[in-house]
Image (cartoon, rainbow, N blue to C red):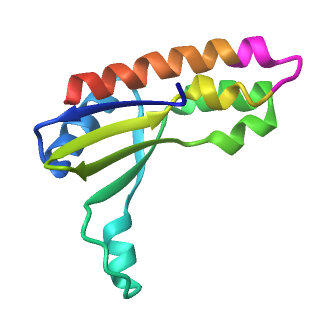
């Protein structure tokens, strides 16, 4: 499956706070938090759904990936979505293994191993924050 998504009873802000703590424990930094709701409303487009995109990165893992293949940088930083849907909050990410599968060359096996490790760690962060 392309993505990994879970549901939580926490608010979007509480889920993000818990996620930030879990990410820090895995040495992932929050580079950017983007509110789609705020940006659309700022542009005069009414959008009532709270929808946040987090861009996260572990610099050691990013260097490994970029050292293997420059095109892998197209998938960096990793994205995690946190949003309201039907009375609950969803937390999810595109699976790094699905994304890295698009890079088919001699470095694929090495990249796949890195992607599997990053994916496992990010899923653990999501599961620990729900």
The magenta segment is 104-111
Q: Residue at x 72, y 35 (%)?
A: 72
Q: Quadrant of residue 99?
A: top right
The reply to whether residue 25 is in sight is: no
Q: Position of residue 38 (x, y in %)?
A: 31, 73
Q: Residue at x 31, y 73 (%)?
A: 47
Q: Is residue 43 above or below residue 38?
A: below
Hey, which residue is sitting farthest bottom in the picture? Answer: 44
Q: Position of residue 130 (x, y in %)?
A: 19, 30
Quick one: 51 or 122, which is closer to the camera? 51
Q: Is residue 38 above or below residue 22?
A: below
Q: Quadrant of residue 42?
A: bottom left
Hey, which residue is sitting farthest front in the picture? Answer: 86
In the image, taking residue 108 as reference, residue 40 lies left or right, namely left
Q: Position of residue 54 (x, y in %)?
A: 40, 48
The reply to whether residue 47 is in sight is: yes
């Amino acid at each position: 499956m392309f993505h990994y998504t879970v549901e939580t009873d926490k608010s979007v802000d509480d889920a993000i706070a818990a996620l930030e703590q879990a990410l820090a424990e895995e040495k992932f930094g929050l580079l950017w938090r983007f509110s789609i709701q705020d940006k659309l409303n700022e542009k005069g487009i009414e959008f009532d759904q709270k929808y946040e995109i987090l861009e996260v990165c572990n610099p050691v893992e990013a260097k490994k990936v970029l050292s293997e293949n420059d095109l892998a940088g197209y998938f960096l930083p990793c994205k995690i979505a946190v949003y309201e849907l039907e009375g609950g909050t969803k937390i999810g990410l595109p699976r790094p293994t699905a994304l890295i599968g698009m890079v088919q060359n001699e470095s694929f096996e090495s990249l796949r191993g890195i992607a599997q490790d990053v994916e496992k760690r990010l899923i653990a962060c999501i599961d620990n924050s729900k």
